[in-house]
Amino acid sequence: MNSTIFKTSKYVTNSLFIKKALELKLSLEEFLMITYFDNDYNNFLDIERLSDNIGLKLEEAYKVFNSLVSKKLLTIETTKDIENRMIEKVNLDNFYNMLTMEKIEEQKEEVKTDIFSEFEREFKRPISSMEYEIINAWLEKGYTEELIRGALKEAVYNGVSNLRYIDKILYEWSKKGFKSIDDVNKHLQKRDEEKIERKELFDYNWLDDEE
């Protein structure tokens, strides 16, 4: 997912950043402060500079900063500068982790939507709520999108359009340790080669063997 970039005269943010701030019900002041630290390369804790840059009185800046710390969106870490002096820096890792999880969930949702749509296209009808839950359970169980699509195509090729049949295919593939359609194809190729070898063995005319 590509996040839309937003720019102000001083700072840059994106749509995912704004979405998460709205979900967390951050105040405008909290949003401005966390955006400030996101844009500040050094992230040194300097409340006076901070209040001046985002247009807050010093007392209000302390209040907003403490609010973000209490919500665990910001943390303070102590480190040393190049002159070996102790300094405090603001860490946004917790907030960034939330953004990462948000992006992963959105990507998963996009994958799910694609799979559900493909089932409806192949079945030539809308899927039921029960079918939706079964497909969703496959995804949560760890079956890859590729394997589910492959099992769907296998079922349609055999003229079967129900999930019980597809579930059996996925179960058998999983039991054999298949992780991708490439694994399935390699297995089928090996099986076909063994069949040909056996056929050639029985087709051989041993009476004409002059050795």
Image: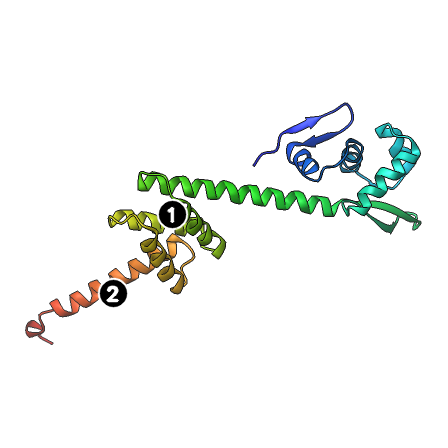
Rendered location of residue 63, percent (x, y):
87, 39
Q: Secondary structure at mark 2?
A: helix
Residue occupying the far front of the picture: 129
State the colouring used for the structure image: rainbow
Q: Is residue 35 above or below residue 70?
A: above
**Residue at 67 percent of width and 32 percent of height:** 14
**Residue at 60 percent of width and 42 percent of height:** 103
Alpha-carbon neighbours of circle 1 within 10 Å: few (<14), some, or many (≥20)? some
Q: How many marks?
A: 2
Q: CA distance from mark 2 to mark 1?
A: 27 Å
**Residue at 39 percent of width and 64 percent of height:** 175
Residue corresponding to mark 1 = 149
Residue corresponding to mark 2 = 194
Type of residue at label 1? Arg
Rendered location of residue 131, percent (x, y):
39, 48
- Compare residues 68 and 107 and report the one nearer the observer: 68
Type of residue at label 2? Glu
Residue occupying the far left of the picture: 207
Q: Is residue 58 left or right of residue 208?
A: right
**Residue at 92 percent of width and 51 percent of height:** 84
Alpha-carbon neighbours of circle 2 within 10 Å: few (<14), some, or many (≥20)? few
Q: Is residue 197 left or right of residue 86?
A: left
Q: Secondary structure at mark 1?
A: helix
Where residue 34 is drawn, which disc sits there?
A: none
Quadrant of residue 53 within the rendered picture: top right
Q: Earlier in the sequence, mark 2 or mark 1?
A: 1
Residue occupying the far bottom of the picture: 211
Rendered location of residue 154, percent (x, y):
30, 50
